[in-house]
Image (cartoon, rainbow, N blue to C red):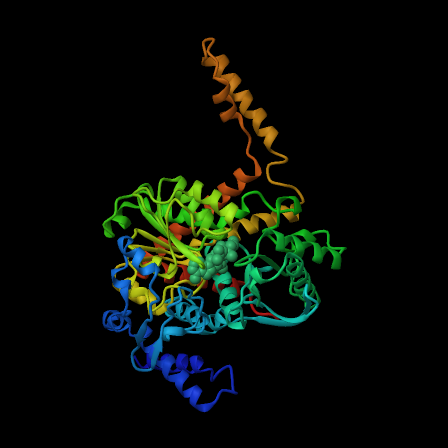
Amino acid sequence: MFLSLLSAVHLGCIHAGWLCSSDCEASELLKRFQRGMAMVMRMMSGSSYSARPFARLCAVVDARAQFSTAAVSSVTTTTVSKSVTLPVGHGNVVAHASGRMTDTTGANGDPTFLESVDIYFDKAAAIAATTPDILAQIKACNNILKVQFPLKCANGTVELIEAYRAQHSHHRLPVKGGIRMAPNVDADETMALAALMTFKCAVVDVPFGGAKGGIKIDPTKYSANEKEAIIRRYTSELVRKNFIGPSIDVPAPDYGTGPQEMAWIKDTFEHLQPNDINGSACVTGKPLEEGGIDGRQEATGLGVYFCLREFLNDEALVAKLGLTTGIKGKTFIVQGFGNVGRHTIDSIYGAGGKIIAIAEVDGGLVAECEDGIDIPGLKAYYKKKGTITGYPGAKTVKFAQGILELPCDVLIPAALETQIHSGNAGNIKAKIVAEAANGPVTPLAETMLEDNDVVILPDLLLNAGGVTVSYFEWLKNLNHIHFGRMSRRMEERGKTALIDALENQFGNGHRFSDEVRSQVVKGNTEVDFVWSGLEETMLLSWENVKRTSQGRNCNYRTAAYLIAIERIATCYRVSGIFP
Ligand code: NAD
């Protein structure tokens, strides 16, 4: 108990910034300390902390409690003001009502995103089989780079651009993690995301350390030429500071970036480092024609689907939630129709799941029929209009944040961090929250959800498909050959010989049909290798997380952190400390 209190005080100090900053006003420090202590005490008191009274206190005073498909139309037109009272140590705050909850600064009294990652880490660290000195090493962010550079805008003005790259852990090299473009990017968010990358790679046994980059802009406000200039200058800053390279640090797409940005990074790197024969491996998520890998675009969403499928096919686990097995017929709500959200939706829809609502920044869609939203129709509409709102096959609602609170079997946040927080967790009616985004559930929200018997499938595992396939792309670039090039025809010849032998031996004159023959004989293409490797990785990792959760009596998130911490600790122990 004494030790717990001591570490609570220690965490409270960290929360107050005592160990990392000295220029805070005293009163602000005190306030932050009180808030940190209150938060830590709640987190540490575990079962003795009842989330229910807190959930009641946080109960949002608006129509959301009655928010159901039937009530959607009334909610659409209402501007709701939500007053949320929080327990001692948090003061009174007013929660967001705009439908956009992208705050990472600890609004609603929740810890910030970075604090949340630390809290989740500490929870697992408390039961991890390693020593405090190793734990401190694993937890710390090794490097954080901040750069500021000018952009000559199309209208002739010059704007200062702020950007970051955090390298959380070098226990394996290169370090790896996406680059984000969003207006709320800052050092803390970048460090939180980099830490998640370290743990994620360890969970799925991808041999990289963790990193993340962020450029503080709203990409929708810049022309393609301006974005190209920003990305190229950012890359050149990384090159100058030795923060990028196939054996050093390998970025990838994240929120607000995609294959085009990765192509500009590769091109810039190769111009600046022309003697590096492995230059194309300096970044992953590239277009196919620029050394990308077939299947990377879909990889994160497909990985989410594989894990969900495994969970939902586990009779014992779903029975506890009062569900039958299988994806078919289950209801799903997805927040975010970007890269991850769209491909997750595709796979679920393809397996017979019903997508009953989708939330986006400019509004959301709620299905009007039993079967859910027609996804091929929506995708065609989105391609034409660039938005999901107004799609005639479903009801458009303006208050997209309320969509998260509709009843469903599985809620999939696939947008940004801290979307499910102490202000709305009590209203979530899903049985499963599947974290396709990074850090979408705050620790307070996690406690409240679990108190309501909601199962959380954690980001560390669920969205690790992206980095897994990025690993395959990196290997492909280092090998300078695409998967299947040397083996496909040979495989086909071998299988043709086998079919011929079967027909000659046992066919009695009968022949396989051309269709069957070509199906059996077909050799593996690159995407076959990639998705098979992805499925293998996700299944093995899920099994490991499930087993660890059962064996160590903890939730799936803590189990994933435990696996990561113990794997990284082994690496430190075996490799020793330099010098
Ligand atoms: P993206 O930019 O392609 O799409 C994100 C979508 O979310 C956008 O359409 C945006 O409009 C929407 N959005 C933003 N705020 C929203 C809100 N409050 N409500 C509803 N919708 C909102 O980004 P992405 O690559 O799909 O990444 C999404 C999440 O997944 C991020 O947390 C990212 O870190 C994580 N992730 C991405 C990858 C990857 O391979 N791209 C891999 C692992 C994790």
- Please report the residue visible at 56 percent of the width from the left and 51 percent of the height from the top: 470
Q: Position of residue 89 (x, y in %)?
A: 33, 82
Is 299 placed above or below 213 here?
Answer: above
The x, y position of residue 205, in whole percent, is 49, 54
In-front residue for pair 342/82: 82
Q: Nearer the viewer, residue 544 or 539?
A: 539
> Nearest the camera: 131 or 176?
176
Residue at 29% across / 69% down in the picture? 60
Seen in the image, is 90 located left or right of residue 485? left
Q: Residue furthest front?
A: 77
Q: x, y percentage for residue 134?
A: 48, 70
Residue 202: tell me if it is visible. no
Quarter of the image that includes the C terminus: bottom right
* Looking at the image, residue 318 lies above or below residue 129: above
* Displayed quadrant of residue 167: bottom right
Residue 227's place in the image compared with 345, above or below, is below
Give the residue at x 26% y 64%.
451
Answer above or below: position of 307 versus 376: below
Residue 146 at least partly seen = yes
Q: Is residue 391 left or right of residue 179?
A: left
Q: Residue furthest bottom?
A: 26
* Residue in front for this viewpoint, 281 or 173: 281
**Residue occupying the far right of the picture:** 275
Q: How many marks are shown on the rendered structure?
A: 0
Q: Residue 578's spot in the image, x, y percent?
A: 60, 70
The quadrant of the picture occupied by the N terminus is bottom left
Place residue 242 in its image quadrant: bottom right
